[in-house]
Image (cartoon, rainbow, N blue to C red):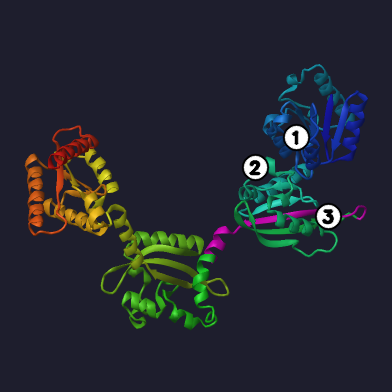
């Protein structure tokens, strides 16, 4: 039988090694959690004795990692620790990730209990011990243990709630501790992170540089060993490595490396976004007044009561007030939506600043101005709030462009009528709503290809535009006219009748005939198909097909 003992106390390791060897079994020992994991990469024991409190990955974390590895699933894990009893929390072994808890006690009693476990293992009856706690009788909690455990819990609670990532490394760069923030930043599960090589988390060229910095600890180093912003897990992360050692005059110093991680991706992205604007004024950045007045954006400063104290030229131009008119007035009165203002101010109080927050303001003429607002709180040297600085960018033209883009997404660029996507969306919507009766008219320009081939595409486009113009003149304002193909148009007629559809078809024919009577070249001929549905249910796709089929029947008659 193969047995592994993980305990940081050399006396316990020697005691267990002698005892188990005398019983005729193979034993390997490890002095901490990290060296245990390294042994388990090539060694699979039947039984593992684990001390609860060890350096470089404690017993509880070690048990959790062992349980997560499929190749170690058959190992029987025994927690070997007096703290299991002294802690007094009555944890079941499975809560720690173990099969059995054996409390440390006098060596004679410990010998008896270890023999007891080995005999069960030899008999293949370890399952009979599953979930037990043995050896705790007549052991009592010591005050020093309680104090140490309380301190340990306090430190764990503090580090677990830090927003910054925190790692501990051995001198050769192996990870022995990671708080939740570090696990989140790195993006690797804790059980896979512990015992991993810290340098392997980075790109090849960065690995070599970090390894060189770490190897210099204990020779010639300055604190911190490293303090840089590096790429990690597709993020920009501030990485600071600090060395720490406990001096022991009888031994060479052993260094622990503490790594602090802070995700600065958003911060750096914001800096990059602002860099273009800052470049415009880099020659004037030391002259605050010049920057303030020559800025292309509106800039305002308010005091702690929200009253304007400065107002640049662009703000006067944007809002229609000069500074003398604005001086002493409250900024709150210029927001068009008080709820949006309160939401923005809530973010400001929480974060200390807001960036590019879209909100509307009132101009002197009463119009609403859409702006991108960036605001920061201002403090004096005693961190007393002085007020705030606001930079406003007029989004009016951008909003116009946005509206144009929305228009183009639903309209045909050549004719200005709706496009196929919008038509199909409206056709589906009307099929579900109460717009009965619903009519559909499909129109097709005859012989458009011949016009394109003989007279050129420009003439063909003019003919398409004329057809669209005729359709606009022929239908009601509530009807939806769309170009759904190169030479094909379709019209949705909500709440119509056979008479309405008939009148529309007649108007198309009359206006087309009038156009052709002017001897315009090329001649315009339109094939028309109609369909109407008066009662639910309405399958608009089927209705469209009927109108389309009728159009092709009409088209065949005209050829």
Q: CA distance from mark 3 to mark 1?
A: 27 Å
Residue interval drawn in magenta: 249-271
The residue labelled by disc 2 is 189
Provide residue 315's location: percent of width, then percent of height. Answer: 37, 76
Q: Quadrant of residue 359?
A: bottom left
Q: Is residue 408 visible?
A: yes
Residue 167 is situated, as x and y percent measured from the top left of the image, at 70, 51
Question: Quick check: can you spot residue 88?
Answer: no
The reply, left or right, for residue 527 in relation to residue 269 is left
Frontmost residue, 178 versus 496: 496
Q: Residue at x 70, y 59 (%)?
A: 240
Cα gap from disc 2 to disc 1, whole angstroms: 27 Å
> For residue 246, which numbered disc appears in the image?
3
Q: Position of residue 558 (x, y in %)?
A: 13, 42
For residue 323, what is the image quadrant?
A: bottom left
Task: Name the image quarter holding the N terminus.
Answer: top right
State the image quarter where residue 122 is shown.
top right
Of callouts 2 and 1, which one flags the residue occurring earlier in the amino acid sequence? 1
Q: Is residue 265 magenta?
A: yes
Q: Earlier in the sequence, mark 2 or mark 3?
A: 2
Q: Position of residue 3 (x, y in %)?
A: 83, 29
Q: Secondary structure at mark 1?
A: helix
Q: Neighbour class for label 1 at 10 Å: few (<14), some, many (≥20)?
A: many
Q: Which residue is mark 1?
A: 84
Q: Nearer the viewer, mark 2 or mark 3?
A: 2
Compare residues 374 and 52 and report the one nearer the observer.
374
The label nearer to you, 2 versus 1, is: 2
User: For the residue labelled by badge 3, is the local secondary structure a helix, a strand or a loop?
Assistant: loop
Mark 3 or 1: in front is 3
Binning the other alpha carbons within 10 Å of mark 2 as few (below 14), some (14 to 19) or many (20 upward) gives few
Disc nearer the start of the sequence (3/1):
1
Question: Which image quarter is the C terminus in?
Answer: top left
């Amino acid at each position: 039988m193969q047995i592994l003992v993980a305990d940081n106390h050399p006396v316990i390791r020697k005691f267990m090694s002698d005892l188990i060897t005398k019983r005729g079994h193979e034993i390997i020992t490890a002095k901490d959690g990290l060296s245990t994991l390294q042994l388990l990469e090539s060694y699979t024991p039947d039984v593992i004795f684990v001390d609860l409190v060890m350096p470089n990955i404690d017993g509880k974390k070690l048990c959790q990692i062992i349980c997560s590895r499929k190749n170690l699933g058959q190992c029987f894990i025994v927690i070997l620790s007096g703290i299991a009893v002294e802690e007094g929390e009555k944890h079941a072994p499975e809560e720690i990730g173990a099969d059995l808890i054996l409390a440390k006690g006098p060596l004679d009693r410990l010998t008896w209990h270890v023999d007891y476990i080995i005999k069960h293992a030899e008999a293949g009856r370890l399952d009979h011990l599953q979930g037990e706690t043995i050896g705790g009788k007549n052991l009592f909690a010591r005050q020093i243990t309680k104090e140490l455990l309380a301190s340990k819990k306090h430190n764990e609670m503090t580090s677990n709630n830090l927003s910054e990532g925190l790692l501990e490394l051995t001198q050769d760069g192996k990870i022995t501790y990671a708080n939740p923030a570090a696990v989140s930043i790195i993006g690797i599960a804790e059980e896979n992170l512990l015992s991993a090589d810290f340098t392997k988390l980075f790109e090849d060229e960065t690995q070599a540089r970090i390894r060189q910095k770490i190897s210099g600890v204990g020779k010639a180093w300055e604190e911190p060993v490293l303090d840089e912003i590096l790429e990690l897990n597709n993020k920009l992360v501030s990485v600071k490595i600090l060395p720490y050692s406990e001096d022991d005059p009888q031994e060479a110093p052993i260094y622990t490396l503490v790594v602090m991680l802070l995700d600065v991706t958003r911060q750096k992205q914001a800096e990059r976004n602002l860099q273009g604007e800052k470049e415009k004024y880099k020659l004037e950045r030391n002259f605050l007044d010049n920057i303030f007045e020559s800025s292309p954006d509106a800039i305002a400063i308010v005091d702690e009561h929200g009253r304007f104290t400065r107002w640049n030229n662009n703000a006067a131009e944007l809002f229609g007030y000069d500074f003398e008119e604005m001086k002493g007035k409250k900024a709150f009165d210029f927001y068009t939506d008080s709820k949006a203002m309160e939401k923005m101010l809530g973010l400001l109080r929480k974060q200390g600043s807001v960036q590019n927050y879209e909100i509307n303001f009132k101009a002197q003429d009463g119009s609403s101005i859409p702006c991108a607002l960036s605001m920061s709180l201002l403090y004096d040297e005693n961190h007393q709030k002085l007020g705030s600085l606001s930079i406003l960018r007029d989004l009016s033209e951008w909003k116009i462009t946005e509206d144009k883009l929305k228009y183009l997404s639903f309209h045909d660029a050549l004719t200005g009528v709706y496009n196929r996507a919008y038509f199909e969306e409206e056709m589906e919507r009307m099929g579900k709503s109460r717009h009965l009766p619903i009519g559909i008219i499909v129109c097709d320009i005859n012989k458009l290809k011949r016009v394109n081939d003989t007279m050129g595409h420009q003439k063909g486009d003019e003919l398409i535009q004329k057809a669209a113009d005729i359709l606009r003149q022929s239908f009601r304002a509530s009807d939806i006219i769309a170009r759904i193909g190169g030479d094909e148009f379709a019209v949705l007629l909500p709440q119509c009748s056979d008479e309405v559809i008939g009148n529309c078809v007649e108007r198309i024919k009359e206006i087309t005939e009038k156009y052709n009577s002017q001897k315009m070249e090329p001649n315009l001929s339109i094939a028309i198909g109609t369909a109407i549905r008066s009662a639910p249910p309405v399958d608009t796709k089927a209705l469209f097909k009927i109108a389309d089929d009728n159009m092709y029947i009409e088209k065949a008659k005209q050829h």
